[in-house]
Image (cartoon, helix red, strand yellow):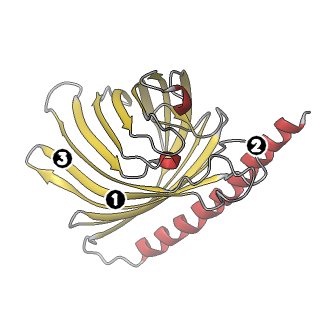
Amino acid sequence: MNNIFVNKLSNLLKGSILLSLFGAIFFAGSVTAGGHESAEASPHEWSANMAVLTEYQFRGITQSNEDPAIQVGIDYAHASGLYVGFWASSVEFNDGPNATQLETNFYTGYGGSMGKIDYDIGFLYYYYPEEDADEPGSGLGEQDLWEVYGSLGTTFDMAYEPSVTAGFAYSPDYYGSDGDSIYVYGEFGLSLGGISPYATVGYLDVDGDKTTPAGYDYVYYTVGASYDIGQFTLDLHWFDAEEGNDAGGSGSGRDGVVFGISSSW
């Protein structure tokens, strides 16, 4: 067994243990909160989720070095439409001694419906707690960033309940590039009993500054389906990130298949 494999396995196990502890704490808190609800419907709703995937890829770019990942999250939603949440995933950008092994997301937003149109707008902060750009072997340098996002969608009252969603995300400091980024996407889904096929197409454009002076852009596709089995959801999807302007440094131009198992409470 070579050292590279041992290091990857060790990183995955450490990330899994840490994230499992997060999940256990959050789930316990949500159950406790639910146990004190009165007979009347509460305006407060807590939920938790956990997933295991063969690879964590984000907008067509691997975040786990094409290795498996484990993810957990907790959400609070108010009847008014306001919500806050926390989500975390094991990551692996390189094998450096100080490379981050954890991504955490903190977000808040407001969502609801106007007639047949569903809307959502919010703020998302990506934080990598172990990443130190000043330490040798830290990976890709400073990665923390924030985004604002929004979406509009609707589900049609007809056979197979087709749904469409269009959205965007904007960041003034995209990962290590120190440049503005805009991501726009469209999604289409169907409901076929317990099977829900879906497709996504997105476009990311990043202005370069530090690590990618020329910037880059690319188109990202996903086609897949999910299947509910009791408390669990199985998901299988194919993705492809088409090469665009100076996309080589972004890790695009790659396709692959990801399988995942998730559950929520």
Identity of the amino acid at label 1?
A: Phe
Q: Position of residue 201 (x, y in %)?
A: 34, 27
Q: In the image shown, does 177 or 114 lie closer to the viewer? A: 177
Circle 2 sits on which residue? 95
The answer to whether residue 208 shows anywhere in this view is yes
- Mark 2, secondary structure of its residue: loop
Q: In this rendering, would 3 be left or right of 134?
A: right
Q: In the image shown, does 101 or 86 lie closer to the viewer? A: 101
- N-term mark: 1 or 2: 2
Quadrant housing residue 77:
bottom left
Name above or below for residue 44 compared with residue 234. below
In the image, which is nearer the foreground, mark 2 or mark 3?
A: 2
Quadrant housing residue 68:
top right
- Neighbour tally class for label 3: few under 14, some 14-19, many 20 plus, Cα within 10 Å: some
Q: CA distance from mark 1 to mark 2?
A: 31 Å
Label disc, if present, on residue 118 of the rendered structure? 3
Most distant residue in the left direction: 115
**Residue found 41% across the figure and 46% down from its top:** 179
Name above or below for residue 87 compared with residue 225. below
Q: CA distance from mark 2 to mark 3?
A: 42 Å
Name above or below for residue 164 compared with residue 69. above
Q: CA distance from mark 1 to mark 3?
A: 18 Å
The answer to whether residue 75 shows anywhere in this view is no
- Neighbour tally class for label 1: few under 14, some 14-19, many 20 plus, Cα within 10 Å: some
Circle 1 sits on which residue? 123
In the image, which is nearer the foreground, mark 1 or mark 2?
A: 2
Q: In this rendering, would 17 be left or right of 43?
A: right
**Residue found 29% across the figure and 61% down from its top:** 109
Identity of the amino acid at label 3?
A: Asp
- Mark 3, secondary structure of its residue: strand
Q: Position of residue 36 (x, y in %)?
A: 40, 79
